[in-house]
Amino acid sequence: MSTWIIHLITVGGYWGIALLMALENIFPPIPSELIMGVGGLAVARGTMQFVPLLIAGTIGSALGNYVLFLIADRLGYERLEPFVNRWGRWLTMEWEDVETGTRFFRKHGGVVVFVLRFMPMFRSVVSIPAGLAHMRHWQFLLYTAAGAAIWNALLIMLGRWAGRRFGEAEQWLGWATMAVAGLTAVYYVYRVITWKPRDKTTVGR
């Protein structure tokens, strides 16, 4: 995956960055840490500029999250509930979890969208309760872009720092990112295996 991402960034430039960041939010296995980290390496080597790279990455992040937001906003509770009830094990959640998350979101609003942009496990998922709560579109995009801009800037600076100090930065950055993705996959499998609906848990007691 890392080779493919580096190739697309090399060929597509800023457009490639924006596309990858949009896909990263729709398909989480594509790691933003690698995308923006490689962009930071390009900044260190003079093939990209910091500000255009940050803008491209932030636009991609916002658009990718907006797709999930629109889906939840259009589907609503009535059409989403049967889907969650049917695929609860693979989603590792129940409809009650969705309702709890949506109530929490309605109470705290945009702050949740902003803060969760810094948490890899939740930054894409938060778009769903935001859509179900019918958050104002401009407000969702504003908080998403603000959080994404800060996170992306940190990743670019990290990649730039690595590019200036290590000759094989792409290789170890790719391995580190794949290690994080692997741990995330293991955690997900563990959640699926150990997941039990609340009614079954209650019956067991």
Image (cartoon, grey):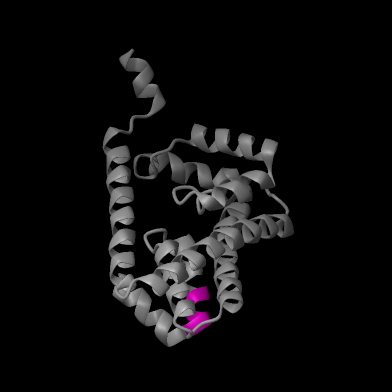
x, y percentage for residue 162? 40, 68
Measuring 52% from the left and 81% from the top, which residue is drawn there?
Answer: 15
User: From where the camera sits, is residue 64 visible?
Assistant: no
Left or right side of 128 for 190: left
- Tell me: 168 left or right of 50: left
Instruction: Answer whether residue 16 is magenta in the image.
Output: yes
Residue 121 in the image: above or below residue 38: above
- Quadrant of res 193: top left
Residue 25 showing in the rendered view: yes
In the displayed orientation, state which residue is furthest to the front: 165
Residue 7, x across and y down, in percent: 35, 81
Q: Measured from the top left, where is residue 109 in percent x and y?
A: 68, 43
Q: Position of residue 66 (x, y in %)?
A: 60, 61
Q: Residue at x 55, y 80 (%)?
A: 49
Residue occupying the point 46% across, 71% down? 160
Magenta region, mostly helix, strand or loop?
Answer: helix
Closer to us: 163 or 37: 163
| Residue stretch in magenta | 13-18
Q: Nearer the viewer, residue 28 or 99?
A: 28
Name the quadrant of the N terminus: bottom left
Note whether 31 is above or below 87 in the view shown. below
Residue beneath the point at 47% across and 43% down: 82
Q: Nearer the viewer, residue 157 or 104?
A: 157
Decide whether residue 8 is among the magenta residues. no
